[in-house]
Amino acid sequence: WWHPLVFGGAAGSIGELLAQPMIVVRTRMMVQGIASGGMQGGEITRYGGFFDTCRKMLRNEGLGAFYKGAAVNAAFTPASRALYMSGVELSRGIVGEGTPTRDFAAGTLAQLIGSFAYVPRDVIIERCAIDGQLTKQVGDCGGSMQAFRTMLKHEGLMGFYRAYIPHQFVWIPYNG
């Protein structure tokens, strides 16, 4: 029973860590342009495309910029995968399996359960990803744990779950 949890968590962590640099680059490219000159906290670094983003990040912040949020990613992914897989097993026991409707319901319930770990992980990773893009940012991330503490202090526990519902619209069709 524990094999899928352990091996799934390990495989998920490795996959997430390999994808981490692209997550950071993608996030920075997506959020540019949200700031105006009067934005509280400073100006935003502008990028001219994928390679320009990589070049500026490497030049201005070093190789570590590509792995901002990696610690929380590595810490949360096994728990997230374990919650998801436990949710699959739990939901199969509740709704059954073998029909498209039951399988979709089981995947949906598993997604809802797994999201209790996935959503906070994603929020922290995204916050860390944009750190360094703003020249001055309230609560700059020195790392994943500092981002976690800053968010907890300023936004409370619900700050980690503000994207819980939109997250479901993205992932339930995929996991259901």
Image (cartoon, rainbow, N blue to C red):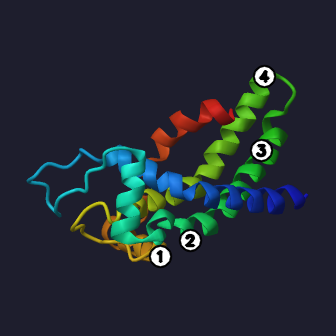
Q: Nearer the viewer, mark 1 or mark 2?
A: 2
List the residue tagged with mark 2. 71
Q: Quadrant of the C terminus?
A: top right
Marks 1 and 3 close (CB-CB < 8 Å) = no
Q: Label 4, label 3: how many angstroms apart (C-alpha)?
A: 14 Å
Quarter of the view holding residue 128: bottom left
Please state which amino acid type lies under the numbered disc 1.
Met
Looking at the image, is mark 4 or mark 3 earlier in the sequence?
Answer: 3
Q: Please, what secondary structure does the residue beneath circle 2 have? A: helix
Marks 4 and 1 close (CB-CB < 8 Å) = no
Please state which amino acid type lies under the numbered disc 3.
Val
Q: Is residue 91 left or right of residue 171?
A: right
List the residue tagged with mark 1. 145
Q: Label 4, label 2: how many angstroms apart (C-alpha)?
A: 37 Å
Marks 1 and 2 close (CB-CB < 8 Å) = yes
Residue at point 63%, 67% (across, down): 74
List the residue tagged with mark 4. 100
Q: Is residue 73 left or right of residue 36?
A: right
Looking at the image, is mark 1 or mark 2 earlier in the sequence?
Answer: 2
List the residue tagged with mark 3. 88
Q: Nearer the viewer, mark 4 or mark 1?
A: 1
Q: Label 1, label 2: how many angstroms apart (C-alpha)?
A: 8 Å
Please state which amino acid type lies under the numbered disc 2.
Ala
Q: Label 3, label 2: how many angstroms apart (C-alpha)?
A: 26 Å
Residue at point 33%, 64% (across, down): 155
